[in-house]
Image: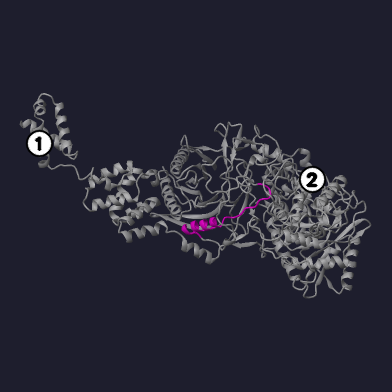
Amino acid sequence: MVSIEHVKHLAWLSRLDLSNEELVKYHIEIEKIIEYLDRLDSITLSDVEPRYYKKSVSEFRNDQVLETRTDLSKTTKNIKDGYVKAPKMR
Amino acid sequence: MTGIVRIGVEIHCQLTGLNSKLFCKCRGDYRNDLPNRNVCPICTGQPGTMPLLNNKAIDYSCMIALALGCTIPSEMGFYRKNYFYPDLPKNYQITQYDSGGIGSVGSNGKLEFGKEYARIRRIQLEEDPGRLIYEGGDMDTSFYTLVDYNRAGTALVEIVTEPDFKDAATVRAFLNKLTSILEHLGVCNTKLEGSVRCDANISIDNGKRVEIKNVGSFREVEKALNFEIIRQESLSSRNIEIKSETRHWDNERKVTKQSRAKEEEQDYKYFLEPDIPIVLLDKSYLNSIQQTMPELPDKRRTRFVEEYHLSDHVSQVLINNKEMADFFESAVRIYSSPKEIANWLVSDLMSYIGVSKTDETSLTDLKIGPRHIAELAKLVDENSISRHTAKSMLNRILRTGEMPSQLVGQFDSSKIIDEKILTKAIEDTFDSERAAVIDASSNPSVINFLLGKVLKLTKGRADPQIALSLIMDKLNKN
Amino acid sequence: MNELWSLSAQQVSSRVRNGDFTIEDYVFQLLERINAIDDKIKAFITVNDDALETARKIDTKIKRQETIGPLAGVAVGVKDNICTKNIRTTCASKLLHEYKPPFDATVISRLKERDAIIIGKLNLDEFAMGSTTEFGSFGPTHNPWDPNYVVGGSSGGSAASVAASECTVSLGSDTGGSIRCPASFCSVVGFKPTYGSVSRYGLISYSNSLEQIGPIARTVSDIVMMMNAISGHDENDNTTHFQKMYEFSDASDLKKPVRFGLVKELIEGSDPVISRLVYSSMDLLSSAGFKWEEISLNSIDYSLASYYTIAMAEASSNLARYDNLRYGFDCQPEGYEWNSYFSTIRNNFGDEVKKRIMIGSHVLLSGYYSKYYLKAQKIRSILRQEVKKLFKYIDILISPTMPVLPFRLGEGIDNPMKRYLIDANTVIANLIGIPAISIPTGFNDKLPIGVQLMADEMQDQLLLSVSKIYERIAGVRRKPDFI
């Protein structure tokens, strides 16, 4: 069971401003999907390890500088004096 | 009554020794740049980009972990710490964590400082966020925020201690030792603004834990902690419950302030960053790091005692500040008189720059270098100048940067205090200034004129006090 | 010369070298064709204004007898979640409608270096989340075999444009079948290489640990040609590996007899029309002298749940960055409280994306992490072990690409779980990182059916060689009627 309160919480964690209508609709669908995913619960895999891709240190990038100077004013209109303009913090 | 204080600290130290950022090729040195000029698609979180881990940052973080006696795992991983905030270009931070056996670069360490020690819980390598600027200067009143991503993605090492400290002074001593280690490793220039930051947590008598954030420099930590200890003790003495909370250090007013009402409990939804493979830290790699690691402060202190026959105390004082220790060794290489040079540094130079301000004042800002001190020591050793003259000389060259040898003429020996020599000079003056001598009996200001003449005759070397009393004696006799 | 648009990439590349026609003529015909028929198909989001200009430049190179790249002139369509510098890259999402990336994806730079022509950007489900190409902000793509039917997805534009000969080859991305599903539904070839064969730098992430860029074409040979251009190690993608050039020959790698394994569970789960077709293909392979047997994959029961858990978890984090500060559309932040600005902006995601982000958040919550996410990762390990064992005595696994025939647009749209289940056959290759291909094998009436071949990881060459044989023995090649 997934409560509508929980879906509300997920929407907050995801920063989605859902209308009540959306909330009701998503609640039904999300609950069905999570119920399907719950089948993962029916097997125990305590002795299995996930598999990871691994590399040694030398395979990662060397500490070299390449200046790109990406111009953010080409991708956003919210620019002031070279800064990116963001909403207020309170 | 004072209860049992338990303090733990979290230090963020920027790896300023790197050329580039942690996950992209932008410059690691973002200071003195116009806003958003030191950025690329990766550090501004453009869609389609992936982190490109800097292998030197791995080296540096391993060096720190080794220096702090940590256990280093054979494999380490990077995780996403998911939370929204406008200074985070991806709305998650790539950091380290421990889950399912894939941990961070170091854990379970221990750092001794003086007779004390602190346990290190964990060390992790992570990226710094961008910088927020509140238009109008205040988070509460500004109508919008400005973001500069120049800092975003620079490499940080976070060091978390157990709550092992009993008072603020001990924390300070720990931080001094840590600073010296970071400087010796060459991974962090701790003097750069914002290169080391410290958060603390504090509880009294096993009470609720209070977090203190936003402490800008190591020097402020002691003040913030002392304030907080007094605040908490004052609350307990009045039987007011201490809340578990996060408080911010107000650098202007020197108080801790309650942060705004805590939002709901954060759940960072950690999971392994899929675009960075697990990093293998095998034995041969760690051995090579161990072998190429610069000398650490403790070892250097021992070497100073053995090699230069300095006292333990003097060695320690020199090594607490890596620049001073380097200065010392450079001077000794120029002129091998370790004790004399150490003396000059510890007793004179340090008081000049103010030991308490080593956070900010740098030796490199001074006009003098090891050559000056080496020469000064040499002149004293060779009895070319007296120690007294040398001290006056030091005061001058600190301002001018002149070489001591050039000044020997002007400071060519100590003041003339020999009464015979002075009497001879005074007699000569009296002979040539007869009129003035006669005037002196009725006009005391003429005495200063005579003293001036005596000083001139001795090229300024006459001790004025002694000369003056000799002049007075002679006038009285006349 | 007429119908240059119907040529394969191999033909284009060799004939422009011979001077049979100019690249300009060929590109012009393609653009005309897009103009004429794309209203019905809606494969394109953006047509590249510079395509003709680039064509002329390469023509000049040929005229001057300068060295030209192996893909000279070949018109490539690109899924609109692959970054193209200064050409908008939307992911079919309102949040990126105006986004012009400041850089080219590695695959794009490699195509350009080889003198291919980027003809345009192709439709998809928003952020590649879907199996039908109905869930994008530009509306659905229609199936060239019948415009009332879905085209498959999420690389629906990439498959439809190649099927309808609006471009010669295309690039898609495959997270759980997103190349193979639309390839199957459109009767074209779609290839998902071994994880790490092709750089993902510039592929806008949906689920990093699962997805790969791959080609869609009308022939296996064109797939090989594209793979030689785009694959190999890239310093901008830490998960890539070095890769030899692929051979075109279908015999070079077959030094020993190829053994096929038909995956029983996937046949049983399919529409009977489809299973029958697969069995008759197996008969054709038998009569050509190949051995095959039915094999079983037990962990399949959990693979889909594992797939959706991982994909949604990674997506919830990948899509967090869309807050409209550094890039996005015009919406002044001034006066908004930041949380409410973020939430307002992000509500512009479509339904499917919002749902997946929320479920992804759910499975990563500290209280649920080991129940879902960690478990899902462990199932990947188990599935991998099981498949690895099979590959000790089987070379190629065979199954229907899709368990269902293409269905009508909008059908079953109110039952998302049912929609998710149709990915059952394709997600296996993504979960364990092995190469997989869908090859056109037949039709039911006018609706295409594709068969999926999978090989062990790094056995892409073997898979491509066998695919050429399969294509010759059991494949079909038709053009949609109205074309």
Give the percent coordinates (x, y) of residue B461. Answer: 18, 40
The kind of secondary structure element at disc 1 is helix
Q: Which stretch appears magenta?
A: B46-70
Taking C286 as reference, is B130 left or right? Answer: left
Residue lying at 77% horizontally and 73% vertically, measured from the top left: C393
Dot 2 amino acid type: Ile
In this view, the residue farthest toward the bottom is: C256
The verdict on residue B64 being magenta is yes
Chain to which mark 1 belongs: B
Q: CA distance from mark 1 to mark 2?
A: 106 Å
User: Counting other residues with Cα less than 10 Å from the Cα at mark 2, is it few (<14), some (14-19), or many (20 or more)?
Assistant: many
Closer to the camera: disc 1 or disc 2?
1
Residue C141 image offset from top left, x and y in percent: 84, 48
For residue B428, the mark is 1
Residue B65 sits inside the magenta stretch: yes
Q: Position of residue C482 (x, y in %)?
A: 92, 51
